[in-house]
Image (tube, rainbow, N blue to C red):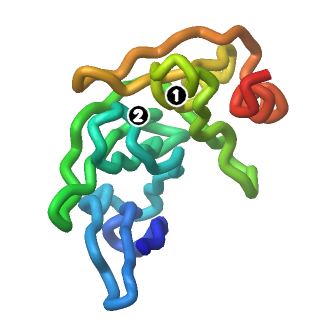
């Protein structure tokens, strides 16, 4: 069992890290600048290949970029990114959105529920065939709407 955490370094910013019983198991690189962080979306087999992927929004107030990493053989490798999405606003003590699997019975796989970078639209983002595709779910992207979308409402 691994624990997924966001680590912050005063000089290097944030990174996503996985810890096991013996300590650090794997980590993404630090963002590279002070006061820069990331907001996790979730972890799971996002593309149906049997491997675990991790998703986070890199600098949700600035870069607004979704990044997908695969955990394999004790290392994390970046697979895909999508600009123009976010899941956090300055001042919030929570991260909005996350993973959902509304189409489990069809085998389409999980989706990531996020907001457009301007918070005007709700998006369902799917990772398949090595790429990310976003589907518009309507708007505006309020915390309540993101929660309802995660519940497949």
Q: Position of residue 127 (x, y in %)?
A: 37, 27
37, 99: nearer the viewer: 99
- Position above or below: 23 against 76: below
Count of numbered tags: 2
Q: Earlier in the sequence, mark 1 or mark 2?
A: 2
Residue 17: image tag = none
Q: Position of residue 26 (x, y in %)?
A: 26, 69
Residue shown at 39%/88% (left/top)?
A: 21
Q: Indicate the quadrant containing the C terminus: top left, top right, bottom left or bottom right.
A: top right
Callout 2: helix, strand or loop?
A: strand
Residue 119 as seen in the image, left or right of residue 40: right
Q: In the image as oriented, which residue stretches furthest toward the right? A: 144
**On the image, which quarter does residue 118 sit in?**
top right
Mark 2 surroundings: few (<14), some (14-19) or many (≥20) residues within 10 A: many
**On the image, which quarter does residue 103 sit in?**
top right
Q: In the image as oriented, which residue stretches furthest toward the front? A: 105
Residue shown at 76%/16% (left/top)?
A: 140
**On the image, which quarter does residue 27 sit in?**
bottom left
Residue 59 as seen in the image, left or right of residue 30: right
Residue annotated with mark 1: 111
- Position above or below: 149 against 3: above
36, 50: nearer the viewer: 50
Q: Position of residue 10 (x, y in %)?
A: 41, 74
For discs 1 and 2, the disc positioned in front in the rendered view: 1
Callout 1: helix, strand or loop?
A: strand
Residue annotated with mark 2: 65
33, 15: nearer the viewer: 15
Q: CA distance from mark 1 to mark 2?
A: 16 Å
Q: Position of residue 55 (x, y in %)?
A: 42, 44
Residue 96 as seen in the image, left or right of residue 31: right
């Amino acid at each position: 069992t691994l624990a997924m955490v966001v680590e912050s370094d005063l000089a290097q910013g944030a990174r996503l890290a996985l810890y096991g019983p013996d300590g650090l198991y794997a980590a993404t690189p630090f963002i590279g600048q002070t006061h820069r962080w990331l907001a996790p979306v979730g972890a799971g087999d996002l593309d149906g290949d049997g491997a675990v992927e991790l998703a986070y929004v890199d600098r949700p107030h600035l870069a607004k970029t979704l990044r997908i990493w695969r955990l394999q053989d004790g290392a994390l490798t970046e697979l895909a990114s999508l600009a123009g999405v976010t899941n956090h606003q300055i001042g919030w003590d929570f991260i909005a959105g996350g993973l959902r699997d509304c189409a489990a019975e069809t085998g389409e796989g999980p989706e990531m529920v996020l907001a457009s970078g301007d918070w005007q639209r709700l998006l369902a983002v799917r990772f398949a065939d090595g790429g990310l595709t976003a589907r518009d779910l309507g708007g505006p992207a309020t915390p309540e709407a993101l929660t309802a979308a995660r519940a497949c409402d």
